[in-house]
Image (tube, rainbow, N blue to C red):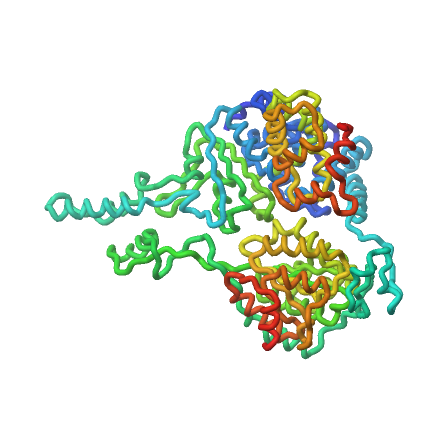
């Protein structure tokens, strides 16, 4: 795998060109993943831009993106490879018919070798990613949704960049793909898998970084309002909510405010649009009613950040 | 690597020092870390730190520890030339920090025994206190104390040995496929495999869903009023863990503690001892609502997966706010596949759930089961394992289980 970047700073500015604001730590991890040819394991809360990393890196490095969405019960047949059994059966029938018609002789050994060869192999995303040239960016999304058994399939692919198929042999990658694994941490992924990867934890962004993201993605929003939006979300993240709003939610909210033609943030406007930020009824109730001792109302929070 | 006198040995010493702090670093990780640093260089301190961090950190909890260690490392390479010295000074410093971070508050408040301790202290609404507050332990204060958790009696040990390995495993139909004798979809892969020797298909094989174990989460109240029963429950949980059941155990009185790891120890005496050591609020007051809230916030997303069942074991003498309890238990019920209230109070045939907390629980859970003896626990476990499609059951279930 050719490292397409000269140094970490170049990588950072190239990512920024594509609209992804990353802090130097994350950029270092991405750069190292290229330089050391290691998979990159990204963990963080939902909506902090883990999946986006793979998409942007694919765009920046000019490689295709191969995405494998994990789910419970995903297995070898749907992730790695499978034999095309119906085609194999058809093939046998055709050969049998030809044999019966007095044509070719049936040689058992060559037949078996023929049936388990590349034309009868169905390539699933992981095998596809390994054999394709140019090597793609392989995104294994939400690995924590798969079950423990599936992680074992990944070990060979991520450790050696190869797939062993018993009937066919080992298929090795000509070019190493850039692999990104993401996890929401709904369960711990096994150490054996993490060991093979570089690890980076993506936290909620700081005020400055989040403001930069809003300015970039929602340029139509007045500058002062963008700062207020950012300040309010940052304040909201300090409340004991079930699901804290991520960057994705902030952007959604900023877009909503832009679409409504908002000029100033008022408690009423926040209440009307807070559905963009909070997705649980309990969280909505907690913030809107603010009954618990120590809870701060929306007006209070806005006052705290100096909007009203 | 930077051409700094003694840098490489010092860096190696640093990495070995991390091992003592609980980082799992094998030779491979160490070589990755060295490569990473060599690749990024040390001109920019922040990038250098990020490079090593990406190579050695594996959990978000390790990040502050690593950053502190890195800071110490930077200070030390500028001063001490001796790697042995630096390693030892470094780890000693960080180990002390870690100790401080993990240690519990050392203030121990011993509540006065008797009725005085049970009176509401923090100026709370006296109406909220249960009317059965005479029982020792429904205290509003945390009692950080060690109960007399004597060694297991021979009878108890016999009970545990007899049961071990004989309890059924709760299960559910999973998402993974396996070969089955009948079904809707043909398993051509298995048929091809079976036909390899003969070249002919004699029997059709199908694909069916695999049956996978269903996790059970036990949230056990260890407040003062539950003291005679919590020990029984922990013994039962140990037996379940000993037969490799998928069980997670949490205990709460005024705070929530996860004790699964301690209970996994083979020797039951030591397992119970360790579990108790982890629980500083053993036999303290009861705040069910807050404990369930903590569980919902911090653990539910990680633990309540794969169709987990939840046992909430408590006598329903709560001193927290009833609103909070109701809301949190209902939330828990939505997250779990089957929430059961196990209560020792059903030992009394005349028991009626009159306290607010008990009524809230009865209304919110899927079913109520008794939990006052080893036998009832075994029965409850079997019902939990069998229980399919949790039906809403209120007081009806209470009556139903009272007979058995």
Query: Which one is nearer the viewer's eye here, B146 or A280?
Result: A280
Give me the residue at 76% from left, 70% from top. B149
Q: Residue lying at the far front in this picture: please name it.
A: A268
Give me the residue at 47% from left, 31% from top. A65
Quarter-of-image position of residue B253: bottom right
Give me the residue at 46% from left, 58% from top. B173
Query: Considering only vertical position in the picture, is A106 above or below A128?
Result: below
Quarter-of-image position of residue B376: bottom right
Give me the residue at 59% from left, 76% from top. B162
Residue B334 visible within the image: yes
Q: Position of residue B19 (x, y in %)?
A: 70, 45
Query: Which one is nearer the viewer's eye here, A98 or A173?
Result: A98
Query: Which one is nearer the viewer's eye here, A77 or B110?
Result: B110
Viewed as shown, does residue A96 lie left or right of B218? left
How many dots with numbers?
Answer: 0
Residue B264 visible within the image: no
Quarter-of-image position of residue B363: bottom right
Task: Name the quarter where the C terminus of chain B is drawn.
Answer: bottom right
Q: Residue lying at the far left in this picture: please name it.
A: A102
Query: Which one is nearer the viewer's eye here, B82 or B91?
Result: B91
Q: Position of residue B276 (x, y in %)?
A: 75, 63
Viewed as shown, does residue B140 lie left or right of B261? right
Query: Considering only vertical position in the picture, is A112 above or below B251?
Result: above
Q: Position of residue B375 (x, y in %)?
A: 61, 76
Q: Position of residue B325 (x, y in %)?
A: 70, 56
Task: Name the quarter where the N terminus of chain B is drawn.
Answer: top right
Query: Considering only vertical position in the picture, is B380 above or below B42?
Result: below
């Amino acid at each position: 795998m050719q490292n397409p970047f000269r140094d970490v700073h170049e990588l950072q500015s190239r990512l920024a060109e594509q609209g992804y604001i990353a802090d130097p730590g994350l950029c270092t991890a991405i750069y190292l993943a290229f330089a050391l040819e290691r998979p990159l394991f990204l963990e963080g809360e939902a909506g902090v831009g883990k999946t986006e990393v793979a998409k942007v890196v694919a765009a920046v490095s000019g490689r295709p993106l191969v995405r494998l969405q994990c789910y419970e019960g995903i297995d070898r047949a749907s992730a790695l490879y499978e034999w095309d059994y119906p085609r194999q059966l058809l093939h046998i029938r055709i050969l049998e018919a030809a044999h019966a018609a007095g044509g070719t002789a049936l040689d058992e050994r060559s037949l078996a070798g023929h049936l388990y060869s590349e034309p009868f192999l169905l390539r699933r995303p992981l095998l596809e990613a390994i054999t394709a040239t140019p090597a793609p960016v392989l995104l294994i999304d939400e690995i924590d949704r798969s079950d423990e058994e599936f992680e074992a399939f990944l070990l060979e692919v991520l450790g050696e960049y190869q797939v062993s198929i018993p009937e066919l042999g080992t298929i090795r990658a000509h070019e190493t793909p850039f692999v990104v694994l993401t996890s929401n941490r709904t369960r711990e992924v096994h150490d054996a898998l993490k060991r093979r990867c570089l690890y980076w934890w993506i936290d909620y962004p700081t005020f400055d970084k989040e403001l930069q993201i809003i300015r970039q993605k929602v340029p139509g929003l007045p500058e002062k309002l963008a700062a207020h939006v950012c300040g309010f979300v940052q304040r909201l993240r300090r409340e004991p909510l079930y699901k804290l709003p991520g960057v994705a939610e902030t952007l959604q909210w900023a877009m909503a405010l832009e679409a409504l033609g908002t000029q100033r943030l008022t408690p009423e406007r926040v209440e009307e649009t807070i559905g963009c930020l909070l997705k649980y009824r309990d969280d909505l109730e907690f913030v809107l009613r603010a009954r618990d001792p120590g809870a701060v109302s929306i007006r209070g929070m806005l006052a705290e950040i100096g909007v009203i | 690597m930077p051409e700094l006198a003694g840098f490489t040995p010092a860096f190696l010493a640093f990495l070995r020092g991390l091992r003592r702090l609980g980082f799992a670093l094998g030779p491979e990780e160490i070589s990755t870390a060295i490569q990473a640093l060599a690749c990024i260089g040390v001109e920019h301190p922040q990038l250098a730190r990020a490079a090593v961090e990406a190579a050695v950190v594996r959990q978000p909890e390790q990040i502050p520890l690593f950053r502190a260690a890195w800071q110490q490392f930077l200070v030390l390479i500028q001063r001490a030339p001796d790697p042995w010295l630096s390693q030892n000074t470094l780890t000693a410093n960080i180990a002390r920090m870690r100790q401080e971070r993990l240690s519990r508050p050392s203030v121990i408040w011993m509540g006065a025994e008797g009725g005085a301790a049970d009176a509401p202290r923090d100026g709370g609404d006296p109406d909220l206190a249960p009317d059965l507050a005479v029982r020792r332990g429904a205290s509003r204060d945390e009692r950080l104390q060690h109960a007399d958790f004597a060694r297991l009696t021979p009878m108890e040990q016999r009970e545990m040995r007899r049961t071990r390995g004989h309890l059924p495993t709760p299960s559910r139909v999973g998402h993974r496929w396996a070969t089955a004798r009948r079904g809707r979809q043909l398993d051509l892969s298995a048929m091809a495999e079976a036909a390899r020797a003969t070249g002919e298909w004699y029997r059709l094989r199908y694909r069916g869903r695999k049956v996978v174990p269903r996790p059970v989460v036990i949230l056990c109240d260890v407040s003062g009023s539950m003291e005679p029963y919590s020990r029984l429950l922990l013994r039962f949980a140990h037996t379940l863990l000993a037969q490799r059941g998928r069980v997670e155990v949490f205990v709460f009185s005024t705070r929530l503690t996860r004790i699964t790891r301690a209970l996994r120890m083979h020797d039951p005496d030591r397992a119970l001892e360790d579990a108790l050591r982890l629980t500083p609020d053993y036999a303290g007051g009861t705040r069910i609502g807050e404990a369930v809230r903590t569980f919902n916030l911090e653990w539910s997303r990680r633990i309540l997966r794969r169709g987990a069942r939840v046992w909430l074991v408590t006598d329903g003498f709560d001193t927290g706010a009833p609103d909070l309890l109701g809301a949190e238990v209902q939330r828990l019920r939505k997250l779990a596949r089957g929430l059961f209230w196990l209560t020792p109070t059903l030992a009394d045939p005349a028991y009626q759930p009159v306290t607010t907390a008990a009524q809230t629980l009865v209304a919110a859970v899927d079913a109520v089961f008794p939990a006052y003896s080893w036998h009832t626990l075994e029965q409850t476990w079997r019902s939990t394992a069998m229980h399919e499609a949790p039906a809403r059951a209120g007081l009806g279930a209470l009556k139903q289980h009272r007979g058995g």
